Structure formats: structure tokens, C-alpha cells
């Protein structure tokens, strides 16, 4: 049986109390649903003296459409099951409702929060193991007890994989995070929040927490999707994940598939510690989703620019092919 280490628990009720609790115990860790951090504690990947539970903080709850600011606000403490079934999220951001509904299992989605999901630790086949297992490969790696990387043996950076289902989608939707800390509030674009370093993969400052996810309301017609490949569909983390957003010119088109494309966003997860936004998609602009060239050139760009690593199970070359296949299929489905 895997045992939890001993720790104290603080249960603040306001954001100010959370910030104060983090100031009082800088080595303390936040816990929301606990579905990521508790397994990591059992695997002895960390041993904080205190956990600060966010479960009682009412300011982190609720989904609000704010038309004056032009954003949908999702409190960091909102459960993934709520996001997956929320009618406003489903109508405005179907790819987010889909990605939230594809996380893990119903039981986990009922516990897991969006704040925990956007701050999910990066994952690697060599580190998300028991300490006994890690001892067996010579005492861990850069992200645990060791000083080498087993994925890129000569590398100096940990390239563990960003495995959140929602992060690529939120980046594709231009979402930002409201962070609250000792210096007050600040908003950071999710596209800028992640570092390419698995030992310190977010730009949150010491003592900061995520209070809210803000997603700009759509300004015109668009299609979005999220595609995930995992071995066991009902529980596994993604091994391939692609978020897509296609903005359309609503003028004069009889069907969305006939509307001219004004922007294409493709964000791929499960590569390194930071999701990758696929670039050089201008060739799709001015075309329509019904044009087969669009799916061909966007999926080819995704294939060329994304190189999966052996940091998670399954052959990287196969996963790379599947990025192309899933991107092409998603765009074809948008056209139908
Ligand atoms: C069997 C299993 C399968 C899973 N499958 C998937 C999957 O398919 N896709 C997926 O995306 N995830 C998956 N997960 C991981 C996890 O369940 C989700 O990512 C979940 O959303 C984490 O949220 P949580 O509230 O439980 O986070 P917690 O475990 O409470 O916290 C996770 C991390 O976020 C930090 N944190 C929490 N809230 C905040 C906040 N407000 N501000 C700053 N930091 C914060 C914590 O300190 C911790 O470092 C799986 C987990 C398990 C156990
Ligand atoms: S990528 Fe390398 S350093 Fe990072 S967790 Fe995996 S083996 Fe360890």
C-alpha cells in the first residue's frame, strides 16, 4: 500500500487567508481536488510540511458570463464535471466542454478542479512511479532524486510532458489566468504561463495562486474541437492531444463550411513541459473548411512542427503520425 507522508492542513476561507497561509509557510502546497497532488505525495515526489486546501474558498467558485468585460469567468475551484455539463460553456466553448469531459473518469471529474488542471504537474514515465521503482533505475532523475534525464540523457532540462486536457484548448481560446498573491492581482495569458522546464513549469511567483480562468467571448462565427488519443478511453491521460479553433468570416456564407477562414489556431499537448502552438498556417486563410487543402496543409504543419519524445508511453513516431491524423480528421469533421 502507498502511504501518504505526514503533513499539516490549513483550510482558509478567503483568498486573503490563502495568500497569508502561503506566506506563513512558503513550502506549503495548495490542494484543490487532490487528484494530482495526492498521488504525487504517495509516490514521494514531494513532502510539503502543510497542505492548504482551497475547498472552502467561496471566491473560487462559479461560472459567470461578463459581457461588459467580454469574457467568461470560471473560478479556479469549479469542478471539471461542472464545466463539461455547463450549458454556457457548451454553447460558447464546445471544445472546452469536450476536453473537460474527457479528463480521467466521472469520479475524478467530480473532484478535480480547473485550477488544479491548469496547474497540473507535468508527467513522465520515469518519474510518475513509486520511489522503489525510481531506485531501480539508479535513483531518479532531474525531476526527482537524481541528476540525469532518462529521456534526453545529455539534456539539462526536464522535458516531462504537459498532460492536461484543458490547457491546449484554453490556449487555443486565448484564455488568461487571474493570479492572486502577496503583490496583489495580475492577469497572465495562458500562452505565456508555461515554461519549457519540467522542474518548474509555470510562471506563478512564490505565494501566488490561480483564482480564475478568463476566456474571451467569441467575436464571430467559429468552429472548435479537441481531439485526444489515450489507451483506455475512460481514465487515461492523453498521449496525443490537439486543440483546434477556426475563425470564420460570417459574411455571405450559406453554411459554415463555405465561410472564408480568417484565423486557424492549433495547440498540441503531451510534447514537452509547454504546449506547442503550430505556426505557419497562413496558407489556410481565405480558404473554406470545405476545401480539402485546408486539412492537408494544417495537419502537415502540425506533423512537421511537433516531435513527441519518449517521456510518456507509446512510440513517439506513432504519436507523431497520430497528431497529423487527428488534426486532419478534426478539420474534416468541422467541414461536414
Ligand atoms: C487516474 C487519473 C487519471 C487522470 N487523467 C487525466 C486526464 O485524462 N487528463 C487530465 O488533464 N488530467 C488527468 N488527471 C489529473 C487530474 O485529475 C486533473 O488534472 C485534475 O484537473 C487536477 O485537479 P485537482 O483539483 O484535483 O488538482 P490538485 O491535485 O488538487 O492540484 C494539482 C496541482 O495544482 C495546484 N493547484 C491546485 N489548485 C490551484 C490553484 N487554484 N492555484 C494554483 N495552484 C493550484 C496544486 O498545488 C497541485 O500542484 C488524472 C488523474 C488521475 C489520478
Ligand atoms: S523528462 Fe527527464 S528529468 Fe524530466 S521527469 Fe522525465 S526523466 Fe526525469
Image: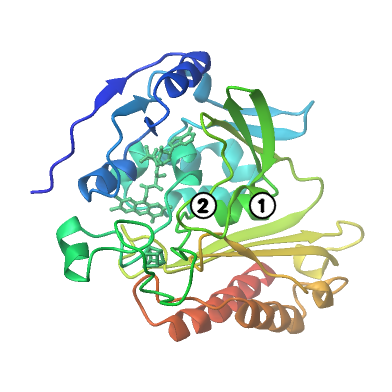
Q: Is residue 234 above or below residue 239?
A: above
Q: Which numbered disc covers residue 201? A: 2
Q: Quadrant of ligand 2?
A: bottom left
User: Which tag is nearer the camera, tag 1 or tag 2?
Assistant: 2
Residue at image x 34%, y 45%?
36
Q: Is residue 255 visible?
A: no
Quick one: label 1 or label 2, which is nearer the N terminus? 1
Q: Is residue 57 above or below residue 239?
A: above
Q: Is residue 276 above or below residue 76?
A: below
User: Farthest right residue?
Assistant: 252
Label 2 element class: loop
Q: In front here: 293 or 145?
A: 145
Q: Residues within 10 Å of mark 1 (few under 14, many from 20)?
A: many
User: Farthest left residue?
Assistant: 1
Q: In front here: 47 or 154?
A: 154
Please name the colour scheme applied to the rendered image: rainbow
Q: Which numbered disc covers residue 191? A: 1
Q: Is residue 235 visible?
A: yes
Residue at image x 63%, y 44%?
91
From the Cβ of disc 2, is ligand 2 less than 8 Å away?
no
Q: Is residue 151 above or below residue 97?
A: below
Residue 81 image offset from top left, x and y in percent = 41, 40
Q: In front here: 214 or 202?
A: 202
Residue at image x 42%, y 55%?
102
Label 1 element class: helix
Residue 89 image offset from top left, x and y in percent = 59, 40
Amino acid at each position: 500500500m502507498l502511504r501518504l507522508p505526514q503533513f499539516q492542513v490549513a483550510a482558509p476561507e478567503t483568498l486573503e487567508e490563502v495568500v497569508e497561509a502561503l506566506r506563513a509557510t512558503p513550502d506549503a502546497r495548495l490542494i484543490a481536488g487532490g487528484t494530482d497532488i495526492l498521488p504525487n505525495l504517495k509516490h514521494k515526489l514531494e513532502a510539503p510540511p502543510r497542505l492548504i486546501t482551497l475547498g472552502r474558498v467561496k471566491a473560487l467558485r462559479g461560472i459567470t458570463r461578463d459581457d461588459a468585460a467580454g469574457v467568461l469567468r470560471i473560478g479556479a475551484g469549479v469542478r471539471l464535471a461542472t464545466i463539461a455539463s455547463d450549458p454556457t460553456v457548451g454553447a460558447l466553448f464546445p471544445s472546452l466542454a469536450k476536453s473537460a469531459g474527457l479528463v480521467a473518469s466521472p469520479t475524478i471529474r467530480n473532484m478535480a478542479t480547473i485550477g488544479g488542471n491548469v496547474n497540473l504537474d507535468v508527467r513522465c514515465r520515469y518519474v510518475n512511479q513509486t520511489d522503489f521503482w525510481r531506485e531501480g533505475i539508479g535513483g531518479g532523475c532531474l525531476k526527482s532524486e537524481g541528476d540525469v534525464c532518462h529521456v534526453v540523457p545529455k539534456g539539462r532540462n526536464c522535458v516531462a510532458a504537459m498532460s492536461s486536457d484543458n490547457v491546449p484548448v484554453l490556449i487555443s481560446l486565448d484564455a488568461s489566468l487571474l493570479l492572486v498573491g502577496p503583490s496583489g492581482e495580475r492577469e497572465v495569458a495562458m500562452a505565456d504561463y508555461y515554461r519549457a522546464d519540467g522542474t518548474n513549469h509555470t510562471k506563478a511567483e512564490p505565494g501566488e495562486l490561480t483564482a480564475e480562468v478568463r476566456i474571451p467571448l467569441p467575436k464571430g462565427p467559429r468552429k472548435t474541437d479537441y481531439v485526444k488519443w489515450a489507451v483506455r478511453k475512460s481514465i487515461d491521460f492523453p498521449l496525443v492531444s490537439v486543440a483546434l479553433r477556426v475563425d470564420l468570416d460570417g459574411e455571405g456564407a450559406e453554411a459554415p463550411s463555405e465561410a472564408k477562414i480568417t484565423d486557424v489556431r492549433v495547440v498540441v499537448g503531451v510534447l514537452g513541459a509547454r504546449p506547442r502552438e503550430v505556426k505557419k498556417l497562413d496558407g489556410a486563410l481565405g480558404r473554406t473548411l470545405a476545401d480539402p487543402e485546408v486539412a492537408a496543409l494544417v495537419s502537415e504543419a502540425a506533423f512537421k512542427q511537433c516531435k513527441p519524445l519518449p517521456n510518456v508511453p507509446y512510440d513517439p513516431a506513432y504519436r507523431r503520425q497520430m497528431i497529423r491524423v487527428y488534426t486532419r480528421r478534426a478539420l474534416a469533421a468541422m467541414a461536414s
